[in-house]
Each structure stands twice: as C-alpha cells, then as structure tokens.
C-alpha cells in the first residue's frame, strides 16, 4: 500500500515527524497539522485547503506546483525549502519564520504576512496580488525579490516587506 500524506496525517491531530518522503497529487482539506516536523519531504502537485499548520516546521522540503488555499501558518517555520510554481491564496502567513527559502514562479494572492520574518530568501519571478497589509509588517533581511514582469532588488539589511512590495509594484 502506498504511503500517502492523507493516511499519514490521519485525523490531523498533529505532532508528526515525517522525513524522506515524496507525496504527489493529493488533496488535503480541513485538517490540523499542528506542531509537526517535515524534513526532506517532497510535495508534488498537492493541494492544501483550509489546513492549519500552526507551529509546524518544514526543513529542506520541496514544493512543486502546490496550492495552499485558506491555510494558516501562524507560528510555523520554513527553512531551506524550495517552492516552484506554487500558489498561496487567502492564506495566513503571520508570525512565520522563513529562512533560506526559494520561491520560484510562485503566486501570493490575498495573503497576510504580518509579524513574519524573512531572511536569506529569494522570491524570483513571483506575483503578489491583493496583499493584506493590516497589522504589524513583516521584516525582510538579506533577501532578493524579483517581481514577475518587473525588476529585482536585493536587500542587505532589515526592511519592511509591505513598503518593499509597494515600491516594486509601483515601478
């Protein structure tokens, strides 16, 4: 029997530790995946609908063509991961730590990044639409943002992410 993400999370109570797995073509919805640890896990063409990832850690993971719709990453950490052609739609990325992460050809639509910390990360050919800028702004440090159909900027120091997006999209 194939080990699926859906079978792994079961009722979705959290506190899992998953390493060295590949999950593809799965749709997961209305689950709590709280306080979990995912290390060196690859997600291909997976959809996460209304998932609560509270305090979950993703390290050295790959996300290819994944969709996060209405998902909550409050207090989570994403470290040394790669997102390719993935979408975050109406998701809550508050109080999130993002370190050494690459977002390539990704889309963020109606996403909230308040109180998040983004360090040593790269957003290449990424789209930001209808961003929710209410609340405390995220900080971006030593990172590069390249907006689709626009230029790119490298940040050496700490900057207010919302002001950076306003600057890039006004150019």
Image (tube, grey):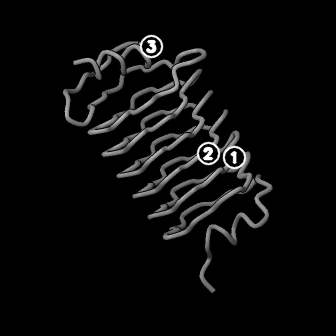
- How far from the left and from the top, in percent, is residue 54? 70, 41
- How far from the left and from the top, in percent, is residue 149? 20, 35
- How far from the left and from the top, in percent, is residue 130? 44, 30
Residue 107 sits in quarter:
top left
Q: CA distance from mark 1 to mark 2?
A: 6 Å
Question: Which of 106 and 134 lies nearest the eye of the viewer?
Answer: 134
The 10 Å Cα crowd at callout 2, few under 14, some 14 to 19, many 20 or more, is many
Question: Which of 48 and 7 lies nearest the eye of the viewer?
Answer: 48
The 10 Å Cα crowd at callout 1, few under 14, some 14 to 19, many 20 or more, is many
* N-term-proximal mark, 2 vs 3: 2
Q: CA distance from mark 2 to mark 3?
A: 23 Å
- Residue positioned 66% across, 44% down in the render: 56
Q: Is residue 47 above or below residue 115?
A: below
* N-term-proximal mark, 1 vs 2: 1
Q: Are marks 2 and 3 in contact (CB under 8 Å)?
A: no
User: Is the N terminus in the top left, top right, bottom left or bottom right quadrant?
Assistant: bottom right
User: Is the C terminus in the top left, top right, bottom left or bottom right quadrant?
Assistant: top left
Q: Are marks 1 and 2 in contact (CB under 8 Å)?
A: yes
* N-term-proximal mark, 1 vs 3: 1
Instruction: Name the residue beneath numbered marker 1.
Output: 52
Task: Name the disc covering residue 160, or none.
Answer: 3
- Residue positioned 73% across, 45% down in the render: 35
Instruction: Name the residue beneath numbered marker 2.
Output: 71
In the displayed structure image, the side of residue 39 where residue 171 appears, left or right: left
Point out the residue furthest to the bottom here: 1
């Amino acid at each position: 029997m194939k080990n699926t993400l859906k079978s792994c999370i079961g009722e979705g109570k959290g506190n899992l530790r998953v390493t060295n797995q590949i999950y593809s073509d799965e749709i997961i919805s209305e689950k709590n995946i709280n306080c979990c640890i995912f290390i060196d896990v690859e997600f291909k063409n997976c959809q996460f609908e209304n998932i609560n990832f509270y305090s979950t850690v993703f390290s050295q993971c790959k996300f290819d063509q994944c969709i996060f719709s209405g998902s909550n990453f409050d207090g989570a950490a994403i470290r040394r991961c790669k997102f390719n052609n993935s979408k975050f739609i109406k998701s809550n990325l508050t109080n999130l730590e993002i370190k050494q992460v690459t977002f390539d050809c990704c889309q963020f639509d109606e996403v909230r990044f308040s109180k998040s910390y983004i360090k040593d990360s790269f957003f290449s050919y990424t789209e930001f639409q209808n961003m929710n800028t209410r609340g405390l702004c995220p900080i971006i440090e030593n990172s590069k943002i390249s907006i689709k159909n626009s230029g790119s900027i490298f940040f050496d120091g700490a900057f207010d992410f919302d002001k950076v997006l306003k600057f890039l999209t006004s150019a």
